[in-house]
Structures are given as structure tokens and as C-alpha cells.
């Protein structure tokens, strides 16, 4: 078979189970295709070919002895913000350019327990701070639907890798939309689980009360399969929820009968591209045809404050989390100085990129004496009100449906000098992180060959419902089957 790299998880698993292919064959096919397209899109920071082939051989041994699980032997790529033992973990930052972790993140342990194959690490906005994957210290990643445009961010490398079939699936992280927004821009499925559903142990922290790991896949069924593996309580993460993990694949039915869907009008923002609005209306009408009861007059009036709240809380937490990078124990260290204090200052000056330094300064200011109550404390109070408003909405609705982004992918460099416009790219996604809710982005259309994503938001720990809605929509449309012309 010459097109093994194009398989979904479900298809690859069936072929491996029937012993019609081997994991080594599948892994070699993925690596060969990756080598073919990588120079065009630049999705990967590190490719661990030897490690991947070793893992594939181990997977084949397990399969031959009858020990096969849903992810056994299937190649994946990992966003370079999760610790991988013996594989470089850079966060796409100069300050961690040569850092090799001595341990695995919990999600990596879970993948290895399944005998999954890890091909390498994907590019991202530095420390996950960005919406375009242009803020990487190494190189920008390009959108495979138009190489002159951004793939979204910060998990742009992961979504591009899946869109171009460099890997069968990938893991990303989502702090304000960093899985969903690039998934929408690249026409793949991106799931942000409920905060606490997936362990953050070994995830390099950006904003600890907002970060969450999730899958990037070619279809919704694959998303459910990956979530089955990575979800669950972890004693090493104090924010990990001791919540039972169902089999998410059992919720995948093509029927939406009697489900109540709210369409919050505040998410159809001023300045939204007309084509995005039209695609959303068409997609929501399709959900109605599938049996859902749709309310077009849902309202979340506090949404307008979410952007301001996010850009106080996230930089404040980033300021505290990134204080550890002083060049003393690990990472980049500036040595040409007269004393320790100057060395620490220069390490941060030359180790961090412009966007990271911008957010550290914003956060430090918000947390400083005399401003803490006016900014950080007030933002936390408004966050509570936003959470409460979502909870009230879910008294009426089983899920909420919005655009993933108000625009299609924009051109490389178009918003690089305008941070406010860049931040507005996440206006539809970041309220969900503030409230800690699950949400999924699914392909929902194209305009001029550029993808449009639809976001489905659920109640806390109700990934089953949003997966059900996403699956039903996907089965009734063919957007997810289209491939970029690369």
C-alpha cells in the first residue's frame, strides 16, 4: 500500500489487527511522507526517526502476541511543549533549544503504555504564546491550504502535521484556543477537553489555570479514541479531576434528536467575515436537519469581557511560571557577564522572544503592588461571573455552537505588528478556557479554498455530547474528507 500515511486511527488499527500491515511499514510510510512535505510546511521541530522505528518494532511484537490496543503501533506527533524523555523539548524557544527532559509527561506515558509510536515534536508559538505559529524561535509553520498563510496557533505544527498526513494524529495544548483555532484554520478536528480531564504533569506551563492537553485528529471518531487513552486522574497533577472516564466512542451516533443547541449571538462578532457567517448558518441548519432543537437567540453578554480577562490572567500566570528560566539549572545561559544578577537578566533578554517578553511584562505589571486588586483580582471576579453565565446557559441547552474563528486563515506577517488584532483571532475560543469547559472544532466549510471551522461547546466533563454532535455533523457532510493541495 502506497498511501498508508493517509489512514485514520480506526483504519490503521483494523489493518494492524488483521496483520495486513505492520507498524514498521506504517511508521516508514509516515516518515517518508513527512520527509516529502516537511520542507514546504515546516510543521516539525524534531524528528525522532530511530526512536520511532524502535517503538514500531516493539509494537509489532505486541501485536504478534495478540496484545493490541486502539493506538498500538500508530504514528503520532507531539506538540513540543510536552516533556518527552530522551527527545528534545524546546517549547519552540531559544531558552530551551537543547533541553532533553529526564522524564515523560503523563500523556506520553499513557501513549507508550499503548505501544504508540512517536515520530517527533511539532512547531508552535514560543511557550504556546500566539495565534499563528509565527512566534517560534526557529521558523514559522505554513498553512497547507495556502503556503502564504498562517496555520493558526499555538498548536499550528500539530494541526498542519495531521492535515498533511505527516502523522496519523497529534497532541496539542489549548490555553485560549490553541488547539481549536488552528484546527479550524487547517480543516482538521481539534478537541479541548474539560480543564482537569487530562493530566498536565509534564506539560510546560504557560497559564496553569487555563492550559489543557487535547487531541488533533483527521476525524471525530479518532478524537474519541485518543481521549479514551489520555484522559484520567493523575496524583502528580493537583488540578487533575478524579472524574470517571467513559468510553467516548460509545457516544458517537449520527442522530441529534431532542438535543437543545444554543447559538450565542455575541460570538457572531462585528468584523466577522461574511463567508464565515454564511458557513456557520449553513452548518447550524444541518444540525437542525439532524434532529437538534436550535435556539438562535441564545445570549452570553459577558463574553465581551472575556478577552480583557484572559489577557490579564494568562500573562500574570505566565509571568510567575516563566520566572524559573534563569539559566542556572537548565536551558540557555548567558555567560559573558560580571555577576549572577546580570547573567540572569541577559539570559531572559536573549533567551525569550518578543511576544513572550511582552506577556511577561503585562503579567508582572498586573501582579505588582498597587495594581493587583485593580487588574488581577478584578479579572478573577469577572471570570467567576463568566463561568456562572455559562452554567446558566447550560440549564437551557445541551451544547452551544459558534464559529471557531471570526476569519479564515490570514497571511503570514499580516498581524505580526498588531498584537491586538492577533489576540482577536481567539475571541471565539478563549472564553471556553476561562470557564474550563470542553469544546471541539470540526471542519465546516471553505471559501476560496480556505477552511472554516465550527466550534461546539459543552458542559463540564460532558465531552460525550460535543463528540456526538460533532460526529453527527461530520457524517452528514464531507468537509473532513478534503485534503490540502500540497
Image (cartoon, helix red, strand yellow):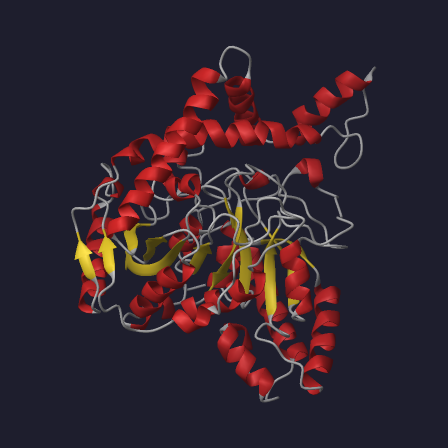
Q: Give coordinates of residue 196: x percent, y percent.
A: 53, 49
Most distant residue in the right direction: 338
Residue 227 picture location, percent across and down: 51, 63
Query: Is residue 406 something that shows in the picture?
Result: no
Which corner quadrant holds the C terminus? bottom left
Q: Is residue 441 above or below residue 63?
A: above
Residue that appears at 57% across and 61% down: 230
Q: In this view, does 305 lie above or below 56?
A: above
Determine the residue positioned at 32% across, 72% down: 475
User: In the displayed structure, does residue 10 sit left or right of residue 236?
Assistant: left
> Which sits in the foreground, 154 or 378?
378
Instruction: Residue 162 in the image: state x and y as whole percent.
Output: 50, 62
Q: In which image quadrant can residue 145 be found? A: bottom left
In the image, residue 61 above or below residue 463: below
**Which residue is at the front of the view, 228 or 233?**
233
Q: In which quarter of the view is residue 125 placed?
A: top right
Q: Nearer the viewer, residue 240 or 39?
A: 240
* Percent of width and height locating residue 467: 38, 63
Amino acid at each position: 500500500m502506497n498511501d498508508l500515511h493517509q489512514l485514520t486511527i480506526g483504519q490503521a488499527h483494523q489493518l494492524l489487527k488483521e496483520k495486513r500491515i505492520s507498524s514498521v511499514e506504517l511508521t516508514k510510510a509516515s516518515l517518508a511522507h513527512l520527509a516529502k512535505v516537511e520542507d514546504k510546511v515546516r510543521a516539525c521541530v524534531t524528528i525522532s526517526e530511530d526512536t520511532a522505528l524502535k517503538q514500531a518494532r516493539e509494537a509489532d511484537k505486541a501485536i504478534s502476541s495478540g496484545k493490541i490496543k486502539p493506538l498500538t503501533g500508530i504514528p503520532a506527533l507531539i506538540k513540543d511543549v510536552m516533556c518527552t524523555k530522551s527527545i528534545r523539548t524546546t517549547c519552540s524557544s531559544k531558552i530551551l533549544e537543547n533541553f532533553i527532559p529526564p522524564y515523560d509527561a503523563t500523556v506520553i506515558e499513557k501513549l507508550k503504555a499503548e505501544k504508540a509510536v512517536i515520530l517527533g515534536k511539532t512547531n508552535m508559538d514560543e511557550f504556546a504564546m500566539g495565534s499563528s505559529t509565527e512566534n517560534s524561535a526557529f521558523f514559522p509553520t505554513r498553512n497547507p491550504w495556502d503556503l502564504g498563510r498562517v496555520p493558526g496557533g499555538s498548536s499550528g505544527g500539530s494541526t498542519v502535521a495531521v492535515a498533511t498526513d505527516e502523522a496519523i494524529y497529534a497532541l496539542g495544548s489549548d490555553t485560549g484556543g490553541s488547539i481549536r483555532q488552528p484546527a479550524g484554520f487547517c480543516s482538521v478536528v481539534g478537541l479541548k477537553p474539560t480543564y482537569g480531564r487530562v493530566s498536565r504533569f509534564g506539560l510546560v506551563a504557560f497559564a496553569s489555570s487555563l492550559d489543557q492537553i487535547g487531541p488533533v485528529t483527521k476525524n471525530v471518531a479518532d478524537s474519541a479514541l485518543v481521549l479514551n487513552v489520555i484522559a484520567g486522574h493523575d496524583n502528580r497533577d493537583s488540578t487533575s479531576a478524579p472524574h470517571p472516564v467513559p468510553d467516548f466512542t460509545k457516544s458517537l451516533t449520527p442522530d441529534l434528536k431532542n438535543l437543545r443547541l444554543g447559538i450565542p449571538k455575541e460570538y457572531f462578532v462585528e468584523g466577522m467575515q461574511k463567508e464565515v457567517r454564511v458557513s456557520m448558518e449553513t452548518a447550524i441548519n444541518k444540525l437542525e436537519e439532524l434532529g437538534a432543537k436550535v435556539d438562535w437567540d441564545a445570549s452570553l453578554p459577558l463574553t465581551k469581557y472575556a478577552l480583557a480577562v484572559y489577557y490579564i490572567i494568562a500573562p500574570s500566570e505566565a509571568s510567575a511560571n516563566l520566572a524559573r528560566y534563569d539559566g542556572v539549572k537548565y536551558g540557555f545561559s548567558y555567560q559573558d557577564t560580571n555577576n549572577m544578577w546580570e547573567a540572569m537578566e541577559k539570559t531572559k533578554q536573549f533567551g525569550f522572544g518578543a511576544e513572550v517578553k511582552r506577556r511577561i511584562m503585562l503579567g508582572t505589571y498586573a501582579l505588582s503592588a498597587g495594581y493587583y486588586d485593580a487588574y488581577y483580582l478584578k479579572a478573577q471576579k469577572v471570570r467567576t461571573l463568566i463561568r456562572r453565565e455559562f452554567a446558566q446557559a447550560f440549564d437551557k441547552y445541551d451544547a452551544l455552537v459558534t464559529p471557531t474563528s471570526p476569519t479564515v486563515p490570514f497571511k503570514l506577517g499580516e498581524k505580526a505588528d498588531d498584537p491586538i488584532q492577533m489576540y482577536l483571532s481567539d475571541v471565539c475560543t478563549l472564553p471556553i478556557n476561562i470557564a474550563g469547559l470542553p469544546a471541539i472544532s470540526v471542519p465546516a466549510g471553505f471559501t476560496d479554498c480556505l477552511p472554516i471551522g465550527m466550534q461546539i461547546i459543552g458542559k463540564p466533563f460532558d465531552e460525550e455530547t460535543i463528540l456526538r454532535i460533532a460526529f453527527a455533523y461530520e457524517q452528514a457532510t464531507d468537509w473532513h474528507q478534503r485534503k490540502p493541495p500540497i
